[in-house]
């Protein structure tokens, strides 16, 4: 189903939904709007992106009529860059819980930003911040989700590793309804996070985790680490036990 051109209703916390039939990237567009003074809760939504961005400079495949691609502008008061770090985990929990409730698909979270079903990638989250010193001017939270894709809608090189809600459930979803439900959850959980910190999200993340208990190889700021992911602490750090039994608290990086 196509998106409406305008959204008359807004979920709590959203100030405006800007819909574009085609964009380079919703996150790039929203950063530009943020620089022009767009308020907290501005949302950029696109039917298709020609330059969708993933973490570490990767490309996010965004064909028209298939997925959900949107970004949300957040201007949290009194948050320093370190405090904002778990936001990606919060958004992942919000999206996974929202999708489980609305579609019944058993979506899991992989630290820090992936949404999986079994071993396959369903979606991802990209958090970008404008900061200076200890001040966060704004955050742009971008979410990409594979919804009505068939396997032929993915490029050949992604086919084995990617999935969609349709492939998992044999159902076709109404993207506007799903987008609205997701946006509502994400905004609600972000507000809770800014008020209370990460603690309320620790247990839900653990329960939906596709990471804990596995051997992981982490590419992080301080090099490569191989070990077992044993827990997520109340600040959102991943606890990894190396071969010598030493525990490492990991705040950022990527699991291979
Ligand atoms: C990842 O898995 O690496 C993150 C993917 C994030 C993709 C979304 S789609 C909407 C928003 N706009 C972008 O350019 N990227 C994010």
Image: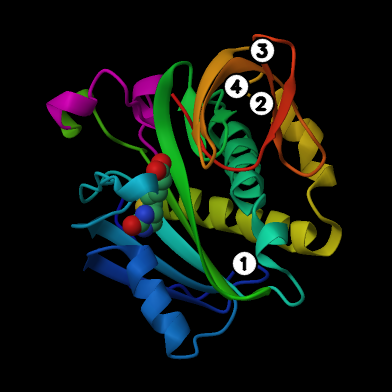
Q: Which residue is at the front of the view, 228 or 180?
A: 228
Image-based side of 2 in relation to 85, left or right: left
State which mark lies toward you, 3 or 1: 3
Q: Assign a secondary structure to mark 3.
A: loop
Q: Mark 4 — residue?
A: 211
Label 4 Cα crowd, 10 Å radius (few <14 / some 14-19 / many 20+): many
Of mark 2 and mark 3, the one earlier in the sequence is: 2
Of mark 1 and mark 2, the one earlier in the sequence is: 1
Q: Residue at x 78, y 44 (%)?
A: 235
Q: Mark 1 — residue?
A: 11
**In which quadrant of the rendered view does residue 163 lie?**
top left
Q: Assign a secondary structure to mark 1.
A: loop
The residues colored magenta run 155-173
State which mark lies toward you, 2 or 3: 3
From the top left corner, tell me how far across and down residue 8 is, in percent: 49, 76
Label 2 Cα crowd, 10 Å radius (few <14 / some 14-19 / many 20+): many
């Amino acid at each position: 189903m196509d998106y409406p051109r305008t959204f008359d209703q807004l979920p709590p916390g959203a100030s405006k939904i800007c819909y574009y039939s085609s964009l380079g990237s919703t996150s790039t567009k929203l950063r530009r709007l943020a620089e022009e003074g767009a308020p907290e809760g501005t949302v950029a939504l696109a039917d298709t992106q020609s330059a969708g961005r993933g973490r570490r400079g990767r490309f996010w495949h965004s064909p028209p009529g298939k997925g959900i691609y949107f970004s949300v502008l957040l201007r949290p008061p009194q948050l320093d860059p370190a405090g904002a770090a778990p936001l990606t985990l919060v958004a992942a929990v919000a999206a996974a819980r929202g999708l489980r409730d609305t579609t019944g698909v058993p979506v899991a979270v992989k630290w820090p930003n992936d949404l999986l079903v079994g071993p396959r990638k369903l979606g991802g989250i990209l958090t970008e911040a404008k900061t200076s010193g200890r001040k966060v001017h704004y955050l742009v939270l971008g979410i990409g989700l594979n919804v009505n894709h068939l396997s032929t809608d993915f490029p050949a090189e992604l086919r084995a590793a990617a999935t969609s809600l349709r492939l998992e459930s044999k159902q076709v979803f109404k993207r506007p309804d799903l987008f609205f439900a997701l946006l509502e959850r994400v905004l609600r959980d972000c507000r809770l996070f800014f008020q209370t910190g990460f603690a309320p999200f620790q247990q839900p993340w653990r329960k939906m985790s596709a990471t804990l208990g596995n051997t992981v190889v982490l590419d992080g700021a301080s090099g490569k680490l191989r070990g077992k992911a044993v827990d997520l602490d109340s600040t959102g750090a991943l606890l990894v036990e190396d071969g010598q039994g030493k525990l490492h608290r990991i705040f950022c990086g990527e699991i291979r």
